Image (cartoon, coloured by chain):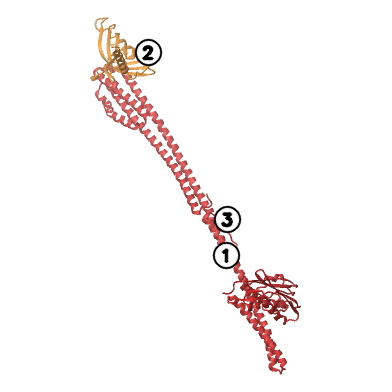
Amino acid sequence: MRWKLEVVGALVLVVLLQLQPATASGELRGPGTIRITDRQRSLDEVDLGVRGRSPGDVEITRWSLYNTRITPRPIGHAELVCTFTGRTSRSCNGTYVLPRGKLVVSGQILFRQFFQLAVVGGTGLYENVRGTLTVTALEGKRRGNLVLFRLVT
Amino acid sequence: MSSSWTLGRRVLAASATLALLIAIGFAILFLATSSLQDATSRERRSKDVTVATLALEKNVLDLDAGVRGFVVSGKPRLLAPWNRAGRELPTRIRVLQRLVRDDPAETRRVRGIVALVRAYQSDYAEPTIALARTFPAVVRTPLVASEGERRVDAIRKRFDALVSVETRRAAASAASARHQTRRAIAVALVGFGASTFLILLFGVYLARAVARPVREVAGGATRLAAGDLSARMTGSGPGEVGALMAAFNTMATSLEQNRAELESQYERLRRSDQLKSELVSMVAHEFRTPLTSILGFTNVMRKRTLSEEQRAQYLAIVEEQARRLSALIDDFLDVQRIEDGRLELKHELVDVGKLLREEARSFEVQTAQHSLELDLPDEALPVYGDSSRLLQVLGNLISNAIKYSPEGGEVQLVGARRDDTVYVGVRDHGVGIPVELQDRIFTKFFRGDANARGIAGTGLGLALARDIVEAHGGRMGFSSVLNRGSTFWVELPTADRAEPAQ
């Protein structure tokens, strides 16, 4: 039984290594980009202020993350907690969980179809990184978002 | 170069060396020209890559212009640049990729640019156009525009880097081409100079090795033709030229010797002619004396009445003078025979001692002033030969000894056997022969100062005697001291040594 577990563990390790983003190799040294896609899993809105969309409302979005050039299965997930500061503008904080670490993002979003957030830090491979996250909504067969991290150390 | 090499081999070797050097020069020039061609080709390729890069960059800018126009205006017709550039883009990329396919570094750069362009299209432009159709307000935010600028800037930086690299390469290739051009020109100039120098050197060598010696030979031949037979080639030349000069010298030496010989012969002939003239004069004189006696006495005998005793005396004188004339004629005929090679000798066993006794006895009765002393061994002195001719030789020697001792005196006749020879010596104590005349004493018709001394003769006796002795395989010589007398000797091979007649 134990040897089966060891084999499964080894396979998982191999898969995880294969699932890492194209540019992530070993340790992040210097500038780099991570290009993946996401697909929204859930969107929860909490109406905390005046009834209806109003400043103070909270929006919690969860995505599954994909690198379809490697595997059709999710390689990670992300969640973003946004507090509306206006009719459409919101202040967001979130975490993108990737195979070799987490990336923490923060910033203002006007439109969910195209937004840019600051990468304020990370863990694991992405410890102490900075940069930007650009999310672009995709149309057609590629439904979801294009997620592009531009990272510097 | 070996001195034994012929001129032909030297010229061939020099020509081959010259051709080799010129070939090396042309090879270097060819390499330099090839390098120049390579450099020019690299420069042209770099320019082509730059042109293709700029065309692709313009294509990308057209893409971006189309996106921006559509995003700002929302009018589909403003997407025309986007559509046109999108159609042209694959061709532009293929052209650029084909141009750089031989250069791995360039290929990587182009691949990076293409990836960025593709990413621009798929990750920015296409989503933005789609959003512009559905959510125009979204794409009109500065955020979208700055993202586009950011991507295009990144692409343009790559283009700039590629163009910069290609510009540097083109400049380097141009510099290399200029350098190769200068080098080719330098090589051509050096090669031309070296070839010219070598050709001149070769010409100088030919002039020194061939033309100059030939000119010398021609000059020498001209001098020879002008009569200067002392002309000689002092220098030396290679191979055939050296042989020509040596042959010329040999020819000149031969000509000089022949000329000297001819001159000598001419001198001898001239002297002989002179002697013959003298002979004619002398013969006329010699003939006149006995003829005058003969004519005088016969006239007296015819006109006068003589006693028997006087008649007998006169007839004896006439007979003697006639015999003298006959002897003279015989001598002349003998000379003629010897000169014509018609002298015939008998080959019989002769006792020279006996001949000497007979001849001494014969002369002894003819002179009262001289005493002939014979010194002969008891045994015979045998030789093979013609007794009459040997008698003629002995008679000549004794006659001369008597004639050239006008004061009279003793004449010694010695006969002896010495080893394989029979020796005969005739010694007088007469006038002797001056040293300066001794080397001509055997010359025909030469009489030295005999005429001045009033000594009769033809000048043929000694010459005839020596020819006869030598015809017998012997030799003849003399020693003489002026005013103290002479000794003439003859050596003949003994009959033991000489071969008898077959």
Q: Position of residue A100 (x, y in %)?
A: 34, 14
B243 or B128, which lies in front?
A: B243
User: What residue is drawn where x is 70% and y is 87%?
Assistant: B317
Output the chain of dot 1: B
State the residue position of label 2.
A127
Q: Residues within 10 Å of mark 2 (few under 14, many from 20)?
A: some
State the residue position of label 3.
B235
Q: Earlier in the sequence, mark 3 or mark 1?
A: 3
User: Eyeballing the image, is B324 above or below B502?
Assistant: below
B278 or B501, which lies in front?
A: B501
Output the chain of dot 3: B
Give the color of chain B as drawn.
red
Q: Is residue B47 left or right of residue B213?
A: left
Tag 2: amino acid? Glu
Answer whether labels 1 and 2 touch (C-beta < 8 Å).
no
Give the color of chain A as drawn.
orange
Q: Residues within 10 Å of mark 1 (few under 14, many from 20)?
A: some
Q: Is residue A123 left or right of residue B282?
A: left
Q: Is residue B443 left or right of residue A88?
A: right
The alpha-carbon separation of the residues under discs 1 and 2 comes to 119 Å
Quadrant into which the C terminus of chain B falls: bottom right
User: Eyeballing the image, is A150 above or below B47?
Assistant: above
